[in-house]
Image: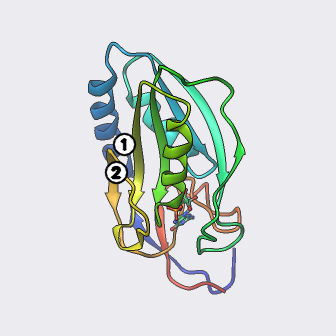
């Protein structure tokens, strides 16, 4: 699609599927007998979110929000903005934030602070991917799918300039044009 854009497979469809099932089992255990609110962080989390919530075998409600931090770049601008907010209050509720990837940690840190200020009963964070070597700010991720190297990745919801979200696997970008 892009010239000189080389994607090398990092996580296969089957690996993602089985790890998502494990995360779903952890969250089922944690939220059994509770009516949690599962928040999808658009757009990168769409695939992970839709697969994960089907593995959480307990009653929950779905909410969506969107943040922007990258623009069209592969590097974080460091500035996080809420571009779409939740439809309903979360006060007194058990909340799960479902993220695609934690890189610098700025986005998750921003979201946790923002949502905490709305007084939920509990706040659990879950991210499919985590790049420990890229972390710039303290941020606690309660459930992590995979720790990955500090390279830009695409696929399974993650994009480069809006493309590649529909790849069923996750690949490392080897060179950019
Ligand atoms: P952070 O604020 O932790 O630096 O970045 C979080 C957001 O940046 C993620 O939700 C994701 O949208 C984007 N991001 C971070 N690393 C990558 C990456 O390797 N590939 C893609 N496609 N997006 C990334």
| Left or right, residue 82 beside residue 112 | right
Disc 1 crowd rating (10 Å Cα; few below 14, some 14-19, many 20+) is many
Residue displayed at 68% across by 84% down:
3
Disc 1 + disc 2, Cβ < 8 Å: yes
Mark 1 or mark 2, earlier in chain = 1
Q: Residue at x 66, y 32 (%)?
A: 86
- Residue receiving disc 1: 20
* Quarter residue 80 falls in: bottom right
- Identify whether 59 is placed above or below 170: above
Q: Which residue is mark 2?
A: 145
Q: Is residue 157 left or right of residue 33?
A: right
> Residue 22 placed where, x, y %?
28, 39
Quote the CA–CA distance across marks 1 and 2. Answer: 7 Å
- Look at 64% across and 71% down and name the residue there: 77
Instruction: Identify the residue at the far top of this view.
Output: 33
In x, y percent, where is residue 84?
Answer: 72, 42
């Amino acid at each position: 699609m892009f010239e000189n854009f080389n994607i090398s497979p990092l996580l296969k469809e089957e690996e993602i599927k089985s790890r998502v099932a494990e995360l779903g089992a952890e969250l089922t255990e944690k939220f059994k007998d509770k009516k949690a609110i599962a928040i999808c962080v658009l757009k990168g989390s769409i695939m992970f979110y839709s697969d994960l919530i089907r593995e959480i075998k307990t009653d929950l409600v779905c909410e969506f929000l969107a943040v922007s931090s990258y623009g069209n770049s592969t590097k974080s601008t460091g500035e996080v903005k809420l571009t779409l907010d939740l439809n309903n209050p979360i006060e007194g509720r058990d909340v799960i934030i479902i993220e695609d990837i934690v890189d610098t940690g700025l986005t998750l840190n921003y979201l946790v602070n923002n949502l905490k200020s709305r007084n939920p009963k509990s706040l659990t964070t879950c991210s499919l991917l985590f790049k420990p070597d890229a972390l710039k700010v303290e941020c606690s991720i309660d459930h992590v799918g995979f720790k990955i190297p500090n390279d830009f990745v695409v696929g399974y919801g993650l994009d480069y300039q809006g493309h590649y979200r529909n790849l069923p696997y996750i690949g490392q970008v080897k060179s950019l044009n």
